[in-house]
Image (tube, rainbow, N blue to C red):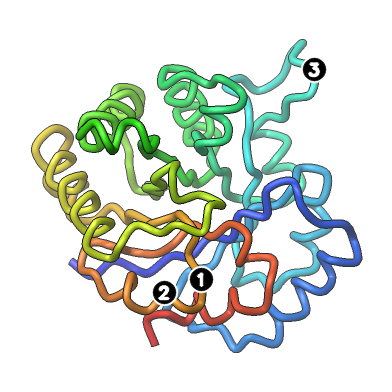
Amino acid sequence: MARKFVVGGNWKMNGDKKQINEIIGFLKSGPLNQDTEVVVGVPAIYLELVRTCVPASIGVAAQNCYKVPKGAFTGEISPAMIKDVGADWVILGHSERRQIFGESDELIAEKVCHALESGLKVIACIGETLEEREAGKTEEVVFRQTKAIAAKVNDWSNVVIAYEPVWAIGTGKTATPQQAQDVHKALRQWICENIDAKVGNSIRIQYGGSVTAANCKELASQPDIDGFLVGGASLKPEFVNIVNAKQ
């Protein structure tokens, strides 16, 4: 089954109006591979600005949301609000949310469920720490994180999974193409066996962790890597090269 390559740019807590205009400039200049789906993950305060400025072919994602439509949750945003300003994606479960802000597997699963029910598409992030990898627990961790989401999700058609080894995020270290492929393959097999074979074969699994223009083509050549979730490089013109990794 052919899976459409999907590249997300997670700007994290970066950017002001000037820098955002520069990013939009190189996205418009491209050219971007039309066979690759592109999504940019934008700080909440700039979601509407970016949605009105980027080409309609580029998806716009919030970087987080809460698990209910509204209420007394100071500082949070809801899927309903994200949709109201025209954005159509949300990134959930990023390692920084898990590690820095203490979000549990259960909370992330509840967020994914509510976002999907609200009509958003979701990039759901999973991944192990360096300690977990060195202890041989990579598969145990990513399977556990995926299982929690699977307990809340029935329809996977609007879910992209992003495998992001925590030890490779923002460190300059990258999993080798073979290391990344091994985890993607094992995860796909787990989904086939524990959720549904059709879901396992159709779901897109991105790799995230210090992806750059220099390493993207080799990573993209792996059979179970269906795209990237890009951090720092998504703020730079080289993001165009990463989007075009399959060309």
Which residue type carries mark 1? Thr
Residue underneath mark 3: 74
> Closest to the observer: 6 or 120?
6
Residue underneath mark 2: 215
The local secondary structure at tag 1 comes to loop
Which residue type carries mark 3? Thr
Instruction: Point out which mark residue 212 bears.
Output: 1
> Closest to the observer: 171 or 200?
171
Left or right: residue 138 compared with residue 118: left
Q: Quadrant of residue 132?
A: top left
- Residue 10 image position (x, y, % from top left): 61, 54
Which mark lies nearer to you, 3 or 1? 1
Left or right: residue 241 compared with residue 4: right
Which mark lies nearer to you, 3 or 2? 2
- Residue 122 image position (x, y, % from top left): 48, 44
* Alpha carbon separation for disc pair 2 and 1: 6 Å
Left or right: residue 142 compared with residue 125: left
The local secondary structure at tag 3 comes to loop
Q: Residue furthest right?
A: 18
Which residue type carries mark 2? Asn
In the rendered image, the quadrant that contains the C terminus is bottom left
